[in-house]
Amino acid sequence: MKSFAILLTCFVTLTMTSATEKKQNSIVIETLSGEHLGFTFFHPDLEENSGNCIFMVLPVRAELFDSKEGKFFEKLKDMGEFQWSRIEETITISMKGKKRLLITKEGHAIDPATEAVIGNWKLTKDKKE
């Protein structure tokens, strides 16, 4: 089953970040210690102010599925499609009006229920034109 998820993610990543496409439509999610945890895919791209998004959890090490961060993002992935909106420099990810994640310009992923930093994020590709 995990090999199917890896294959699906590779397909989605290649489709959404083609070499000719210059728009940023995904971010990398990392643990607090900087280990790769997965991706968030945005539609439309992040140049817009709102849209939909999904999570894909593919940690660099299998043990990370059992980490606090891994469990948090796995739960989000299992919930399905979310709505996102940007107000100034913060992206709010919500479902049915309830905030589920905040993405800050400082590179933090925050759980709005606890206001705790649950991970970090970075762009998946360089935005140079």
Image (cartoon, rainbow, N blue to C red):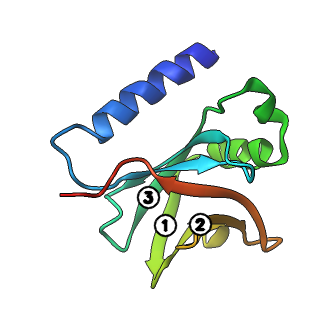
Residue occupying image coordinates x 51% and y 55%:
122
**Residue 46 appears in the picture as rendered:** yes
Q: Position of residue 103 (x, y in %)?
A: 58, 67
Residue occupying image coordinates x 32% and y 31%:
14
Q: Amino acid at mark 1?
A: Trp
Relative to residue 31, is residue 126 drawn left or right? Answer: left
Relative to residue 78, is residue 41 drawn left or right? Answer: left
Q: Disc 2 marks which residue? A: 94
* In the image, farthest residue toward the bottom: 88
- Asked which secondary structure carries label 3, the reply is strand
Separation of disc 1 and disc 3 at Cα? 6 Å
Q: Earlier in the sequence, mark 1 or mark 3?
A: 3
Badge 1: few (under 14), some or many (20 or more) residues near its Cα, within 10 Å? many
Q: Disc 3 marks which residue? A: 52
For the residues bearing labels 3 and 2, Cβ distance under 8 angstroms: no
Separation of disc 2 and disc 1 at Cα? 6 Å
Q: Amino acid at mark 2?
A: Ser
Q: Amino acid at mark 3?
A: Asn
Badge 2: few (under 14), some or many (20 or more) residues near its Cα, within 10 Å? some
Q: Disc 1 marks which residue? A: 84
Badge 3: few (under 14), some or many (20 or more) residues near its Cα, within 10 Å? some
- Asked which secondary structure carries label 1, the reply is strand
For the residues bearing labels 1 and 3, Cβ distance under 8 angstroms: yes
**Foreground residue, 106 or 37?**
106
